[in-house]
Amino acid sequence: MRTTADQLRDVLDHWRSGTGPLYIQLADAIVSLAESGSLEHGTRLPSERALAESLHLSRNTVTAAYQHLRDDDWLDVRAGAAPTLGSRARGLDAMSLQDRFAKILPGAQAPLVGLSSACPPPAPSVVEAFADPRATLESSPTFGTGYAALGDPELVEVVVERLRADGIDANPDEVVITSGGQQALWLALTALAGPTSPVALESVTYPGVFDAISAAGSRPLALPMGPDGLDVLASVKLLRAARPGVAYVTTFHNPTGTTLTPAGAQAIAEAAAATETTLIDDRITADLALGGQAAPPFASLGTGASVVTISGLSKVFWGGMRIGWLLTNATLAAHLRQRKAAMDLGSSGFMQRIARELMADCYDETLAWRREALRESLDATVDAMREHAPEWKVRMPDGGPSLWVEVPGINTDRFAARAEDAGVPVAPGSAFEVAPGGGTSYFRLPFYLPAEDMRLGVKVLADRAA
């Protein structure tokens, strides 16, 4: 089992930049592990003498680092006892899973403008397909048992073609058809994660991942994020120090809309390969590029990292298209297909056949329509914010369907409650934070709805924030 000193040694090996006092670098290394959850509240740190010997530092350096941490309230110290991490390291699991996920689900009552969920209304191709499914399928929509428990083979072939177009060397026996991306994520995490090591993920992230981490008996490890997305340098250091079994990374990040550069993706994949960390590459929104180019798939980079790629149809076609997939090695894929079949007898055979036809015949056309609709809604949303809420701060997204909006000086949990009462529910930042404070004063604002709905929604939200 890796000790605290082992983790600190790995952090320092990749932290030292040649600038700043060494004791500050040591203190920063301890804080980085505490903030991410790799070292938890109450963790006992080595004595000054033991840590100095383990890290080959002078005892004066360790003494100064511990004093710096005590001055900043990171350490609790009792006479004659080793220091422990104090209350500033508390609270990665402060919110229940039910409370967290409930913040992004629509309520029982139909809203005036529903903005809590980032699920799109149906594209025209979906409306047409379900208006006359017999014509879409060129056969009866009812057939056999209606099950396709191990995945419709023709749908699998279409998925493989799309993966290969993205530069991934995919084969049919490596694909698992799932009931949406959420199930793909749950299957992968519960198969790969466990209690012996954490799951690394961006410090604000999709709330649906937390239930899967809990079901796996694991815990989250927060990878640092900055204004432009994942802090690659700090995340690489943390991966090398904590050596998590799994890291979950999104393409167009939910909720901020940022993405990795090709160099950043390469660095993360190389670190994962070096630490034997399996990367779960969530590409659900990867095709929804708006102001930037999506990061390349981790599986296409040739680093030797173990990668599970997940994606689906809900963000391009319709939230109700609960068809997703994951790509992994053939052995794990065979296991997960059987596991999924035991859970729900496979996704609906009818829905898989519809998905097959939509992907094969009109994916590119629908994607072009969806991107244009998103751009129109985004423009209307930003214009409405300039008019009604000029104090709100937002970074324009590289892609994806959401804005991560900062409302300075406001508690967004209370703001979200007022917004729901006014008929415009939104998800507060606390639903997305791994460690408390990461989403303070933020809320997620999806812009899937038509421009006129977005203008009305922003106006009501601005009134409630006043």
Image (cartoon, helix red, strand yellow):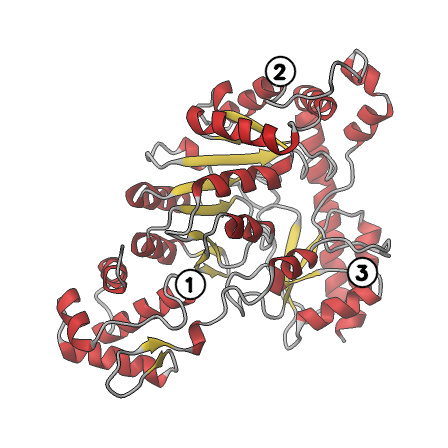
- For marks 2 and 3 on the same chain, the one whose residue lies earlier in the sequence: 2
Q: Which numbered disc, 1 or 3, marks the residue that appears first in the sequence?
A: 1
Is the residue marked by circle 2 packed among few (<14), some (14-19), or many (20+) residues within 10 Å?
some
What secondary structure is marked by label 3?
Answer: loop
Q: Position of residue 282 (x, y in %)?
A: 53, 41
The three-letter code of the residue at mark 3 reads Val
> Would you identify the image quadrant in which residue 122 lies?
top right
Q: Which mark, residue 154?
A: 2
Residue at 43% across, 37% down: 298
Percent x, y of residue 301: 38, 34
Name which quarter of the figure residue 5 lies in.
bottom left
Q: Which residue is mark 3?
A: 424
* Identity of the residue furthest to the bottom in this view: 79
Is residue 237 or residue 174 the one in the foreground? Answer: 174
- Provide the residue designation for mark 1: 37
Measuring from the top left, give residue 39's x and y in whole percent. Answer: 36, 65
Q: Are marks 1 and 3 in contact (CB under 8 Å)?
A: no
Cα separation between marks 1 and 3: 34 Å
* Quadrant position of the N terminus in the picture: bottom left
Q: Is residue 235 left or right of residue 368?
A: left
